[in-house]
Amino acid sequence: MLWYTFSMKLYYDKRAKDPIYYAQQGFRNGKKTTTKNVAIIGKHSELLKITDDPMAYAKQQIDKLNKEFKNNKVTMEVTVDFDQKVKASNDLVSSSNLRNIGYFFLQHVYNDLHIDSFFKKMTEGSKITFDPNLVNRFLTYARILKPDSKQGTYSQLNRYYEEPDFDYQHILRSMDIMQKHYDEYIEHLFHHSNRIITRDTSVCYFDCTNYYFEVEEDDEDYIDEVTGEVIKGLRKYGPSKDHKPNPLVEMGLFMDTNGIPITMNINSGSDNEQICALPLEEKLTHMLKGKKFIYCADAGLGSLNIRKFNSMGGRAFIVTQSIKKLSNTLKEAVFNDYDYRLLSTNEPITIETMKTFDKTDTANMSLYSDKAYKVINADKVVDLGLQEEKVGINGKTRKMKSKATLQQKVIITFSRKMMEYQRQIRNKQIARAHKLLKNMDPSSFKKGPNDVTRFIKRISSTKQGVKVTDSYVINQSVIDEEEKYDGYYAIATNLDDDIKTILEISANRYKIEDCFRVLKTNFEARPVWHYNRNRIIAHFMICYTALLVYRLLEAKLDQYGTHFTIENIIETLKNMNVNNVQDMYYQSTYNGSQVLTALNGVFNLGLDKKYYQPKELNKKIKKISS
């Protein structure tokens, strides 16, 4: 609902013998129009003391006030009745009269993506009577500013200045439209985002994450009635880093060099993340129209097939390589303290020197932050522990060692700082294992691959005629084996570029982890309450849109020369509320800040005022949306 104000006019009681002249102004809230006396010009008899024609004088004052009004300066008289009650309502709980205008900045980015044109194209010729772009717009803002269920978001639409008007069913129908045109929507966002920020896709980072659902049963597979194809259920039990016993869905995400998302896919929670990468990357190569890029991912997403695919078409790969999976020959080359060089100077150095130098000596400060590296040729796939899938006569696939060759090399690095960090973490785990030993319950002992029980060894002993007894001790051999790898890190690549450049590219993988953190923590993309497959996918499309809009806004701020945390930016946008003062003007309830100054500097919206005329805010919305 938008407010409009009209020019002031003269008002007085024509029946009075000694009338009082007022400046009266009209205000329209949607279809409702009200008038208020906003200023007293004077009583007729009093004005005769300063002028011979009070009526002409009053009209001159009205003209003066209208000129000031056009220049955003006006004097108004506001009457406050401290006994006046709030407006009665049958609502169960009281609602706030504050309206958020911080989303105007998000609207600026959203509009530049021309998502409205996408929906117009997708719904052309249909008989829908609602605006799916309006729905998607405010679902996107809500995901950033006040994440909630779709029902919760719908119930709080009046918190936004525009007070959008649509029904809850329109949310569900808009989500169906989005899911139906999934690929077109994601591709539209990418191409139009290039008009906001020049996208750097020279390196495309990929990773997967899981989202859990608060349900006890997973989805059953079903048969497509048209094609006869067996469609795998979306919400399935699978491995989860959170160890939650809930069905999952899996999201695969590609990100550009600047941490801005490029594309994504949603897969069944039981799918192996390795097989999710290539289908999405094939779509990515189509989106990029064959443009060359470097595929960068962690070890779990660097299978033989992925490396093969990124050895063609001008593409390349940089993937994390597990040192523990290397062949004995390559492991020997890793731990052979020969041919290592300092990353900063390329001068020869030994790992023994890196492990033993005095880090308290100020002369060694740069060395403590430096790394040693070695390059090992590794064209034989079997030496990297990679496997290939073979399809048997019965149609089943099995993994086996591959005799294939693939041009690549392994870059081994060693960091003293990383070694000490890993040992600090392990020492704490060993201390916990010692505490566990004091009250060990033999019946509950279960060794895990990553928890502290891996350091505990069970010893069974027996004497003739006596039953077997179990005892538990710290397994020093496991500790010694793990310590061998402390400080070492490896990546595999088919690039011949400068080693430092390759390592810097790999180091930026943290940005995609940050994308997932933003989605899960700041945007509360989980848990997901939808059960319909199409709506689940549409939910993540909305979350993806919110991530893209936010990252583009963040990139614009960075270009402006300022950088703030996501918490700083969102808190500022959330706090940018205005209060409607007697239908005459809006008053800001927020303070100035560095974030606000930077946002206004980038988008030039002038949202740093204490007071706003309704027509001024309406013009801003119209300007942003044009």
Image: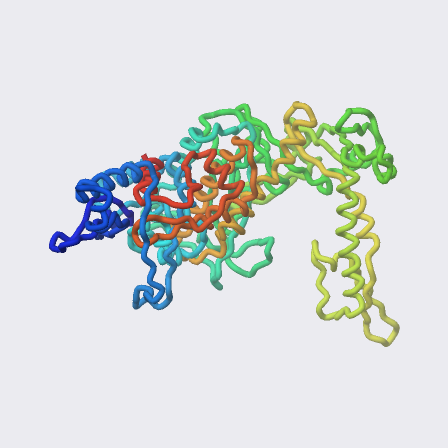
Q: Is residue 510 visible?
A: yes
221 relative to 442 in the view: left or right: left
172 relative to 429 in the view: left or right: left
- Residue that lies at the very extreme toward the left in this rendered image: 15
Q: Quadrant of residue 409?
A: top right
Q: Residue at left 37%, top 66%?
A: 93
Q: Residue 362: percent from the left, percent from the top?
A: 84, 35
Q: Is residue 7 visible?
A: no
Q: Give the camera-side residue of 151 and 184.
A: 151
Q: Residue at left 50%, top 44%?
A: 592
Q: Quadrant of residue 315?
A: top right
Quadrant that contains the C terminus: top left
Q: Give the camera-side residue of 231 and 467.
A: 231
Q: Residue 391: percent from the left, percent from the top?
A: 54, 41
- Residue that lies at the very extreme toward the bottom in this rendered image: 465
Q: Residue at left 52%, top 43%?
A: 593
174 relative to 384 in the view: left or right: left
Q: Residue 224: percent from the left, percent from the top?
A: 36, 50
How many numbered discs, if any?
A: 0
Q: Quadrant of residue 414?
A: top right
